[in-house]
Image: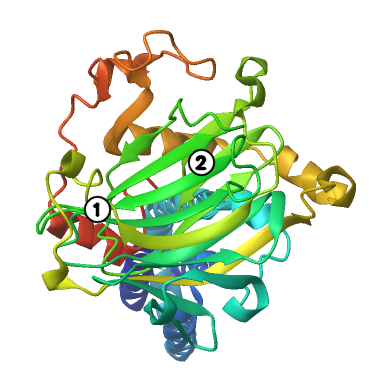
């Protein structure tokens, strides 16, 4: 973001240097060269470094060539005046460079929690996953590093991890079907329902399709110990079009905390409380990805159905990460490696991340179970009523207009940066 401003500073300073060629200007250009090269992307460094070096060499050569005794006396008079101007410029440039470096540091810090996790290598489909259903509606590309799941009139499709995990970091880059997608549900989630049928745990990312011209919605949910009667749903809009490019969706699950991420931004935090009891997920789970027909509920409570005229609907998954404690569910306490568990427990959000999460929730959260006083007249134990609740109706739905026109979302998506970073 700031490289163009730095280039402008460099060019402006070089122009002033070509006019004055004072020692102060040379010093300022050297300072700016050092500041720029220490904080700029590589693609800008070589081009601008060459430009600055050429300017410095040309100015130094010209200065020595023109220094006759008479010119020396005349230039000494000029430099006294120039030094006053350049000292102010020096302060401005130093301040601007510091601010730019600070901005760069803050932006990169948004991903600090994810970067603390070691060895976040992606795994191919053959290495870590198995097909659940869908036959030919599951297709592998790029040597198994990308998976396409399709929904048509015959069936949807899905896959799951080969192992169960007790805590960890689970992530995928996902691109959703475009055009009319009402009734279509794409899910990226963790569950152990096939093993613990009556006491299962679950952590969900669900993507709910919509009619043409309306954006996809994202829903997160948490179930613990079979507590499906108590839904902990939250729904959000997005600051980008999820059908135009891949975006990363991640779940960080530790002994006492769950974090949901979209790209580098944490969007939801669930902290274990004593009052939650067994409703906090605590048993080994598998990772799942599916696409299926949710016509009876997914879009405006079932008002709009899947229209198979637009099939197949294809959801694409890439950059699949499984970093956690692979365990045998019958003896998970003995099998899990303690260092990883302690690592996940130690991860906390930075101030920058928490601020980004709060801004995201304020702008884009459209429903929260914590604000649904019709459904839950008695507040659930992990919920806190704060200023955020003033923005929601008693039904838990937002009072604010969350609609963002597609052109603006596309602009943010192309920039690759969330609007609050």
Residue corresponding to mark 2: 353
Q: Quick check: 240 above or below 282?
A: below
SS of the residue under disc 1: loop
Seen at 37% across and 34% down, the residue is 234
Q: Is residue 41 visible?
A: yes
Q: Please tell me which residue lies in front, 62 or 298.
A: 298
Q: Residue at x 22, y 18 (%)?
A: 393
Within-10-Å neighbours for mark 1: few <14, some 14–19, many 20+: many
- Quarter holding residue 274: top right
Numbered circle sitting on residue 370: none
Residue 23 visible, this angle: no
Relative height, residue 396 to residue 292 (above, below): above
User: x%, y% of residue 370?
Assistant: 40, 21
Label 1 to label 2, Cα distance in Å? 24 Å
Where residue 65 appears, x then y in whole percent? 45, 91
- Residue visible at 28% across and 15% down in the picture: 390
Nearer to me, 96 or 105: 105
* Residue in the image at 55% along x and 68% along y: 320
Give the residue at mark 1: 216
């Amino acid at each position: 973001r700031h490289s163009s401003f730095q280039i402008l500073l460099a060019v402006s300073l070089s122009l002033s240097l070509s006019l004055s060629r004072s020692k102060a200007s040379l010093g300022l250009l050297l300072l700016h060269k050092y500041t720029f090269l220490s904080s700029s992307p590589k693609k800008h460094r070589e081009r601008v470094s060459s430009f600055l070096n050429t300017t410095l060499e040309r100015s130094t050569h010209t200065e020595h060539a023109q220094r006759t005794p008479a010119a020396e006396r005349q230039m000494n008079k000029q430099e006294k005046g120039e030094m006053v101007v350049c000292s102010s410029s020096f302060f401005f440039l130093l301040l601007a460079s510091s601010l730019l470096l600070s901005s760069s540091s803050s932006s990169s810090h948004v991903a600090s929690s994810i970067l603390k996790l070691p060895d976040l290598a992606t795994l191919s489909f053959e290495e870590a996953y198995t097909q659940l259903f869908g036959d030919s509606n599951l297709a592998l590309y790029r040597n198994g590093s990308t998976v396409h799941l399709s929904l048509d009139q015959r069936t949807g499709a899905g896959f799951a991890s080969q192992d169960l995990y007790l805590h960890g970091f689970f992530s995928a880059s996902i691109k959703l079907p475009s055009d009319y997608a009402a009734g279509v549900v794409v899910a990226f989630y963790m569950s152990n329902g096939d093993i613990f049928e009556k006491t299962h745990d679950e952590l969900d990312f669900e993507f709910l399709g919509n009619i043409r011209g309306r954006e996809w919605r994202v829903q997160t949910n948490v179930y613990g110990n079979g507590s499906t009667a108590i839904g902990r749903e939250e729904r959000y809009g997005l600051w980008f079009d999820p059908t135009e490019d891949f975006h990363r969706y991640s779940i960080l699950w530790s002994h006492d905390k769950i974090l949901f991420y979209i790209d580098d931004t944490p969007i939801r935090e669930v902290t274990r409380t004593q009052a939650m009891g067994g409703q906090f997920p605590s048993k080994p789970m598998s990772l799942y990805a599916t696409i299926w027909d949710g016509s009876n509920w997914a879009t405006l409570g079932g008002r709009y159905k899947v229209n198979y005229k637009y099939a197949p609907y294809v959801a694409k998954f890439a950059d699949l990460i499984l970093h956690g404690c692979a365990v045998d569910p019958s003896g998970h306490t003995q099998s899990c490696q303690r260092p990883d568990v302690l690592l996940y427990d130690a991860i906390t959000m930075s101030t920058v991340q928490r601020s980004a999460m709060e801004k995201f929730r304020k702008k884009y959260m459209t429903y929260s179970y914590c604000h649904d006083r019709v459904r839950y007249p008695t507040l659930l134990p992990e919920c806190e009523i704060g200023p955020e609740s003033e923005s929601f109706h008693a039904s838990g739905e937002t009072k604010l207009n969350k609609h963002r026109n597609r052109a603006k979302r596309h602009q943010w998506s192309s920039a690759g940066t969330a609007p609050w970073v």
